Image: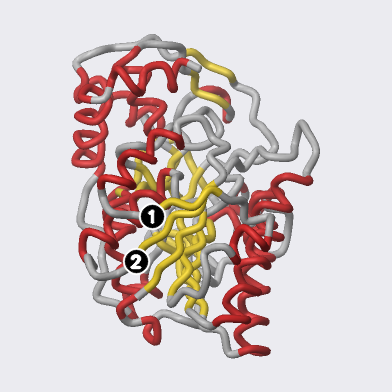
Amino acid sequence: MRILITGGAGFIGAQIGLALKRDMPGASVIALDKLRRRGSELALPRLRAGGVGFLHGDVRSPDDIAAAGPVDVLVECSAEPSVHAGYADQPGYVVQTNLTGLVNCLDHLRRHGGDLVFLSTSRVYPIAALRALPLHAEETRFALRDGACGTGWSPAGITEAFPLAGSRSLYGATKLAAELLIEEYAALYGLRGIVNRCGVVAGPWQMGKVDQGFLSLWLARHVYGGPLAYSGFDGTGRQVRDVLHVADLCELVAAQIAAPQDHAGLACNVGGGPDRSVSLTELTALCRRTTGRSLNIGADPATRAADIPYYVTDGAALAARSAWRPRRGVQELLDDMHRWLVDQRHLLEPVFAA
């Protein structure tokens, strides 16, 4: 089997590539990446040591993808992942990377055959509708009002039936458009596509920043020092997201590659669910306990255009068609990341300080 992973030196792409090669030693696994994001270069020795091939290339270039040759599976992990992309600058890069790049991947599979595993996002759900959920402020988090439920949402989280009308950010719009194109390529050309609407994914080797990868950034600040602030929603830190250990996501992708017929044709929410949800205030307490270090957290009360107060994944649709379940909790996730930050300090501290 030949497997191509676009964005293969990124956080998720590299982890998936290494896990697939470890568990499928006879497979040829190739990571394609242009190494734009600071820290992605650190993946190259790990990929090499794990037996994953590397191809320097850009999904915006059809020729770069063609250089990989025919593959049995293409795992599309490349993306401009910031939900704030395009708000303060030009939208071209996020559109070309997230949408044109996906079209180039689809055309490669159309010509040569092969299945697609596409990492989409929970950000396909509209901002205004998520902000309109009936939330109340508890001591450490926002929570749904008792007994509240509606179309596509309940105390179990957000389902795929959540209404899609409304703005969702350029990042979310490109991912939703990509999902629609996958559906069209499936109908027109018989291409088999698997779509995972991922929520917050975290773990070792995530080079977190303020606008993407908040869990690793929060923990890294507690280890290395540096400023942190609760942004938006009056600066209280009550906004809530559920989190998924990247190792759990790797296990899902492996299961999907092994049985694509069980997963193709339906976009499914993928996340940690209510039991793995955390607010920023709660995350601060967990980081303090994990590292033994306390920080003074600032407050930036202004809410930015793409900020949402609450998102928790309801994974029932995926559970109905798969035996996969997330296995690792928030504390295990933080413990794994803490060991990584301490053990690799000489490599990581300059990246997080940049």
Drawn side of residue 171 relative to residue 44, left or right: right
Mark 1 or mark 2: whose residue is earlier in sequence: 2
Mark 2: amino acid = Ser
**Which residue occupies 40% across, 68% down?**
3
Drawn side of residue 112 relative to residue 319, left or right: right
How far apart in space, not on screen, are marks 1 and 2 (Cα)?
A: 8 Å
- The image quadrant of residue 172 is bottom right
Drawn side of residue 217 relative to residue 111, left or right: left
> Where 269 falls versus 227 (above or below)?
below
**Which residue occupies 45% across, 53% down?**
199
**Could you tell me which secondary element the residue under label 1 belongs to?**
strand
CB under 8 Å between discs 1 and 2: yes
Q: Quick one: quadrant of the N terminus?
A: bottom left
- Which circle marks residue 28 in the picture? 2
- The image quadrant of residue 280 is top left
**Could you tell me which secondary element the residue under label 2 belongs to?**
strand
According to the image, label 1 marks what residue?
53
User: What scheme was used to colour the molecule?
Assistant: secondary structure
- The image quadrant of residue 241 is top left
